[in-house]
Image (tube, rainbow, N blue to C red):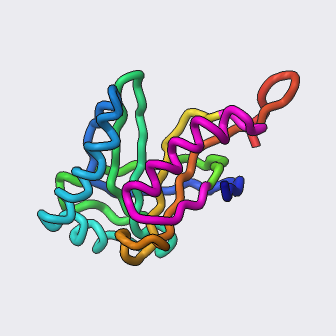
Amino acid sequence: MDVSIKKMDKIRLLGYKERVNKENGSNFRRIPAFWSECAADGRLKALQRYNDNPQLVSLGVCAHESETSFDYYIATGSKQVAQDPLLHTLIIPTTTYAIFESRGKIPEALQATWKRIFLDWLPSSSYVLQDGPQIEWYSLGDMATNDYESQVWIPVMKKRDNGLIEM
């Protein structure tokens, strides 16, 4: 599993938001449907007009998690003020992220990456999950191809024998 650890400066995003239920894996069905709806009704195209950060063109962001649900944003990097009342601003503070490379068709490749992170990497790594937004980064290109590139970013802190230390 290709992973890098990187401290990311504060990020400002604009995006469409939906509260997603995670019980019984319903988030794995609802999130792809949300993307399809935003593509079909023109929201994705409208959102891209706000992008002013070429490294953060297309993102999926999980934030404000509870035991049963979380806010999911289809977002873009932007310092602009939203003219669309359906757009929400999300500010992500400076955070250390573990960044996982993913290759393959969406949503299958990313869903497999999420599962490997939580079932394999986190339990055996020298890091623990930190509270904060989790990010799916999407490259430009055809999401239906076997070589499509995407990433999952999770906020982490390094473990120490005598406790935790933030990086």
Please determine whether, in this image, residue 41 is positioned above or below residue 111. below
Instruction: Please say if 50 is above or below 94.
Output: below
Q: Nearer the viewer, residue 76 or 20?
A: 20
- Depth check: 166 or 153 in front? 153
Let me know if residue 164 is in the magenta part: no
Q: Quadrant of residue 9?
A: bottom right
Q: Position of residue 141 (x, y in %)?
A: 40, 77
User: Would residue 13 be found to the left or right of residue 98 on screen?
Assistant: left
**Residue at the extreme left of the image, as rendered:** 41
Q: Residue at x 37, y 75 (%)?
A: 142
The residue at the point 56 percent across, 51 percent down is 153
**Residue 46 placement, left or right of 8:** left
Q: Is residue 124 left or right of residue 120?
A: right
Q: Is residue 156 visible?
A: yes
49 or 74: nearer the viewer: 74
48 lies left or right of 40: right
Quarter the C terminus occupies:
top right
The answer to whether residue 78 is seen in the rendering is no
Residue at the image position 46 percent from the left and 54 percent from the top: 110
Residue 22 in picture, x, y percent from top left: 35, 31
Q: Which quadrant, please, contains the N terminus?
A: bottom right
Count of marks overlaid on the render: 0
Which portion, as a residue range, is magenta?
A: 100-128
